[in-house]
Image (cartoon, rainbow, N blue to C red):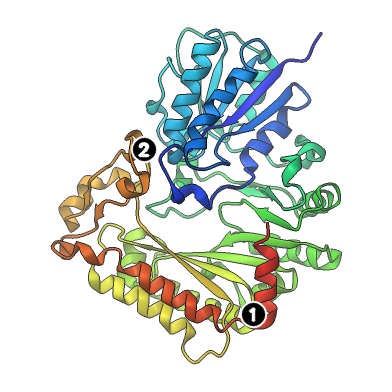
Amino acid sequence: MARRTLLLISPPVLHAGRWWANRIANKPHLDSLAGYVRDLADVRLVEMDTVAGEQQAEQVSRLDELLPGSVDLVGISCWTSLHYLGACAVARRVRSLAPHLPIVIGGHHATAAPDDFTHDLCDWVVRGDGEQPLRALCQQWPRRPGQLTVVEGGVFDQSSSTHIDWDRYGRPEARDHAVWVGLSRGCPFQCRFCVEPQRGTASSRYSVDDALSIVERLARTHAPRVICFSDPLFGTNRRWTEAFLDGLERRELPLMFWAETRADLMTPQLLDRFKRCRFKLDFGLDAASVRMVERMEKSPDPRRYLARSRELLQHANAIGLPHGIYLIFNFPGETPATSRQAQQFIDGIALGRRSMSGWLSSGSFFILPGTSAFLRMAENAATYGTKIRHPRWWTEVGDHYGLATDVLPSRAFRGREDQLRAFKSWNQGVNDGWVARYPAEVTEFCQAFYRM
């Protein structure tokens, strides 16, 4: 019997402009989905969001080359809210070309807002991780059901690394650049702006031995320059992290690595190990004033959080660990005073230091469906005077960055809206000053790293 065919699609990002331009990357969620069912199906991956501008919309026409007749099931990844209108466009195109073809949609946006999808667009919406529901569909190869069903996917079981076909993992054309892989899933924190808590508190991770085996295997078969770990928060388990870094250091793989974490989870000794293993770490600081740490629920002890983060970020600079720092301005409750305090915190990291190894990336807050900030819009409006002018911006046609960040964080900014973007010029000045103090080895590392 001929093998059935699964078509996995990452839809185009239709209205993001340059907001999406630097997000083009190999997507570990699609690669994991494909790797989990390759024993049951011939899998074809189509990424329509790897081009920009007018070419984004043109990608939908590529479906004419694939449909109808050669596919048995279509999976569409609504990975982010930026993908929503593109996912709808792809689903409608599939429906017009092959009305009989079953469609399943998943991703962060589908998890947060399953009601954004109707039966004219798809047959199943998956909330949570998609591997197990997709495998169940590929075992049954069902016809289109009579109604839309929301499926709870839960958290993918990472008890065994053999579940994924690692030899055929990822896009072949990207193998000599960067490979993205997730070693753990789930996050113990409940930050108010983040979509991750909607997947629940359950978590999973590969054992240290399995994780090291995966990295070694990908290094051998894919020969990437960089392996990027897509874990929502790398380093949440101290014992696992220490053992994993010990194993990496012993193996002396000719690679660079990337991961995202929180500075307050680190120790100076851990950062030393990350440096020896040739990591670039990005720290989700997000808030840098006591009030905003509290309002974002980054930590139950904001002063300790900031003191700990300052200590570790200064240590990262002292040892020359390449790193990034993420910061969010204009979250509900932000005032000119808290904005100044955040800037002073960042400026203080560099005081008295001859060399730096960090890069600051500041952004303006935007609402995402299902987050605590989304659910508390009325409360924030009453408490702070917050105005979210486009609370469902992902459904609108227009400049999504402009729509999403059209936010008045508090009544304290009323009449001073011109100051809401002032952090951008300050951010650029910070980076200009920091990069000028990069030691040669950090400059060389970053040049090699960003070639991915």
Q: Is residue 130 above or below residue 353?
A: above
Total label count?
2
Q: Is residue 434 above or below residue 292?
A: below
Residue farthest toward the left in the current orientation of the protein: 415
Q: Is residue 76 above or below residue 277?
A: above
Circle 2: residue type:
Trp
Circle 1: residue type:
Gly
Viewer can see residue 402: yes
Of the numbered discs 2 and 1, the one sitting upstream in the chain is: 1
Viewer-proximal residue among 123 and 382? 123
Viewer-proximal residue among 323 and 419? 419
Q: What element does badge 2 sit on?
A: helix
Residue at 58% x, 70% y is 323
Q: What element does badge 1 sit on?
A: loop
Horizontal relation, residue 305 to residue 262: left or right: left
Residue farthest toward the front in the current orientation of the protein: 54
Q: CA distance from mark 2 to mark 1?
A: 40 Å
Find residue 394 and name its label. Answer: 2
Residue at 69% x, 42% y is 158
**Label 2 CA crowd tier, 10 Å (few <14, some 14–19, many 20+):** many
Give how far across and how far down residue 265 sits, in percent.
56, 67
- Within the image, what quadrant is residue 274 found in? bottom right
**Label 1 CA crowd tier, 10 Å (few <14, some 14–19, many 20+):** many
Task: Locate the N terminus and report the quarter of the image it occupies.
Answer: top right
Task: Locate the C terminus and report the quarter of the image it occupies.
Answer: bottom right
Give how far across and how far down residue 108 sits, in percent.
49, 39
Q: Is residue 365 above or below residue 90?
A: below
Residue hosting label 1: 320
Find residue 389 and name its label. Answer: none
Horizontal relation, residue 437 to residue 390: left or right: right
